[in-house]
Image (spheres, rainbow, N blue to C red):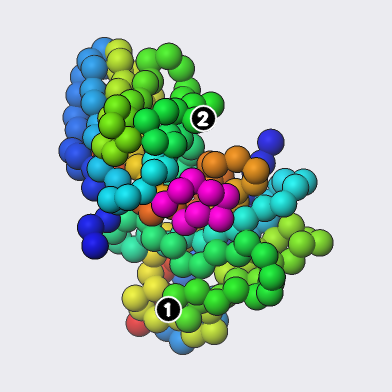
Amino acid sequence: GAGVSQTPSNKVTEKGKYVELRCDPISGHTALYWYRQSLGQGPEFLIYFQGTGAADDSGLPNDRFFAVRPEGSVSTLKIQRTERGDSAVYLCASSLTGGLTDTQYFGPGTRLTVL
Amino acid sequence: AQSVSQHNHHVILSEAASLELGCNYSYGGTVNLFWYVQYPGQHLQLLLKYFSGDPLVKGIKGFEAEFIKSKFSFNLRKPSVQWSDTAEYFCAVKGSGYALNFGKGTSLLVTP
């Protein structure tokens, strides 16, 4: 079946601009996660959704970052007033129930470059 | 706070050589352990995982990992690597929360 998809695959923007990154999880998966991967690092957790609600947003670096999942499927990560330090690959993952032993399936990521 | 340490950042091996990638974690409670792999141009995919039971876990493509609780380690092994194993390998730990905590990754290059 179809995996996790993310759009766009690449996004170049200017410092100070607003961006939206989209994630389409595996059909039927109730849990959705966003991670950020900087160059030379492993993915770092940003936020976790169970259904429509953000169950854990402890990884969001500051209030410029916000994510929604209004219908419990597609999610959008929103970044306001982008900074050069926001440049990274933003990864989305989904899992069936969000249980502790669930496998998280990752999408291909969106490479964000802030000039 | 949880942390995951991968000892080798870059590994170069010849085909048919044996592989062992180290992973140590810092966490006091029950953990779930994962190895993910990212082949060039592809997305992260699960190699294997450990939740409980037999500490020797077998995954896809001939990989295995051993959980040694006393050493807080979950090292990845493969007896004979192939050129197609060239990839980035990430160890990850999940404790009582929902997030995966990843190591920095090990880049493996297998030469023909």
Name the residue carrying label 2: A56
Quarter of the image with the N terminus of chain A is bottom left
| Residue found at x 70% / y 61% | B73
Image x and y of residue A70, in percent = 29, 27
Question: What's the residue type where badge 2 is placed?
Answer: Asp
| Residue found at x 63% / y 62% | B51
Residue density around tag 1, few if under 14, some if 14–19, many if 20 or more, within 10 Å: few
**Residue A27 falls left or right of residue A97:** left
Q: Nearer the viewer, residue A88 or A25?
A: A25
Q: Is residue B63 visible?
A: yes
Quadrant assignment, res A66:
top left
Q: Is residue A38 visible?
A: no
**Residue A9 falls left or right of residue B4:** left
Question: What's the residue type where badge 1 is placed?
Answer: Lys
In the rendered view, tell whether residue A25 sits above or below residue A84: below
**Residue B30 falls left or right of residue B14:** right
In the rendered view, tell whether residue A63 sits above or below residue B72: above
Name the residue carrying label 1: B61
| Residue found at x 52% / y 61% | B35
| Residue found at x 46% / y 17% | A62
Q: Nearer the viewer, residue A97 or B80?
A: A97
Residue density around tag 2, few if under 14, some if 14–19, many if 20 or more, within 10 Å: some
Image x and y of residue B111, in percent = 38, 77
Task: Check if mark 2's residue and mark 1's residue have beta carbons within 8 Å.
Answer: no
In the rendered view, tell whether residue B50 sits above or below residue A87: below
Q: Start and end of the magenta stretch?
A: A96-103
Quadrant assignment, res B57:
bottom right
Quadrant assignment, res A15:
top left
